[in-house]
Amino acid sequence: MLADFLLKTRVISRVYVMSPKGSHGLDNEYISNILSNSYMPESIAAHTSITNIIENRLAQQMHLYNNSINRENLGQVVPLSELRGNKDTQGLSKTIPLKDQSIYILATLHDAYVIRLNQENWWDHSHYKKYFINDDNNDNRLLQLSTREPHLAFEDIHQQLNKIINTFMEIASGKSITEIKRSPQLNFTKTAAPTPAEKPKVETFDKMLATPFGMHYGKRIDSILSEIFSNDMDELSEELRDYVVNAFDNFKETNNVSIDSETVKKLCTWLITSKIGSFAFIGNFLRKDNNLDKQFITDFTNNLFKIFFELKFKAIFKIIRHQENISFACSFIIKRIYINFGEEIPEYGLFLINAASQFDKNQNL
């Protein structure tokens, strides 16, 4: 029971191994994914040692797997779609044929190894490519072979572990307080009704975080949004203000926004975090012009935030190029904005939401 719980939270990884002679099925070995520094696991000697052990096992198991499917080249890397296809979706059985056991062993080694790589694009890692070719479709790419649960990085596992520990501590603390407050004596004296305690703020759980995409990218997206909406920026320099004015004048002539990426990021972040209104922005940046068309100003601002959105989420969209996944990602980002900042989204935060809603129609990454 405890092992299953730890496996579910990815605190440990299970690796199947051959049973001793005379017994059936496969035995289990467990690998701890708890590190003292989940942000820099490569700095931990034990992590490097375990990774090397897994790589040695992978090399041996790759040969055994290729031999079990009668492949002439025993050193040939294994396509993941093939491995998924050969693996029984019903799970491990005590009567699993001997020739198929290598499939299960290789599948669990793969899942444990991906965690040890601790890379975002782990399927492109040079060491990974020595053993596997990830030719899965977009729906399967981020899923484990052994459980079909999403792969998690060390940071995500560490965060889950902290939540579990905090939950247990809260339960233990609540039980202790209850025991302290419970009186062993009966009191028949009528007393004033106690003042009801203030209800704690209930954290909204977003079901989209439990999707494969949410579990893999949710933390990163929330981090980017927090950087945008919670940034404590100083006033913009006069030089940057001049850049914006010149960019707007150029937009009136060419209908294109020509402004460097750093200026775009600083300007749009400042517009959102300073909660400046559109009238103040127009007066301070775009010069007062009685003949200035409001729609023209809106078009300029929309183009500005489109560039900003692309810059902030470029790394994520480079990985998920499929149109349906891009649309889902944009919807995910918009929902996270409303959940995390919905009560106080500033005027220019709405321009960011509009850029997200239009991105899948305009993206060209």
Image: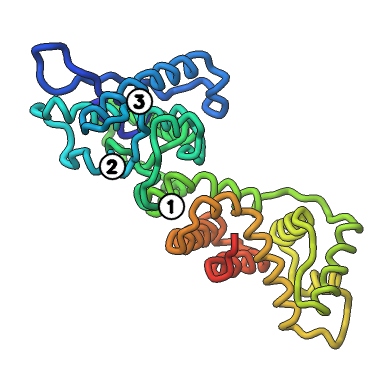
Mark 2 vs 1, N-terminal side: 2
Query: Which residue is label 2 attached to?
Result: 82
Quadrant, the C terminus: bottom right
Q: Position of residue 116 (x, y in %)?
A: 45, 27
Q: Residue 167's image quarter?
A: top left
Q: Examine the rendered structure and indicate whether residue 142 appears above or below residue 262.
A: above
Quadrant, the N terminus: top left
Amino acid of disc 1: Thr
Give the foreground label among 2 and 3: 2
Query: Which residue is label 3 attached to?
Result: 12
- Is the residue marked by circle 2 packed among few (<14), some (14-19), or many (20+) residues within 10 Å? few
The residue sitting at 35% across, 32% down in the picture is 76
Q: Position of residue 274 (x, y in %)?
A: 74, 58
Amino acid of disc 2: Glu
Query: Which residue is label 1 attached to?
Result: 204
Towards the viewer: 97 or 48: 97
Mark 2 vs 3, N-terminal side: 3
The residue sitting at 13% across, 11% down in the picture is 21
Residue sitting farthest toward the front: 72
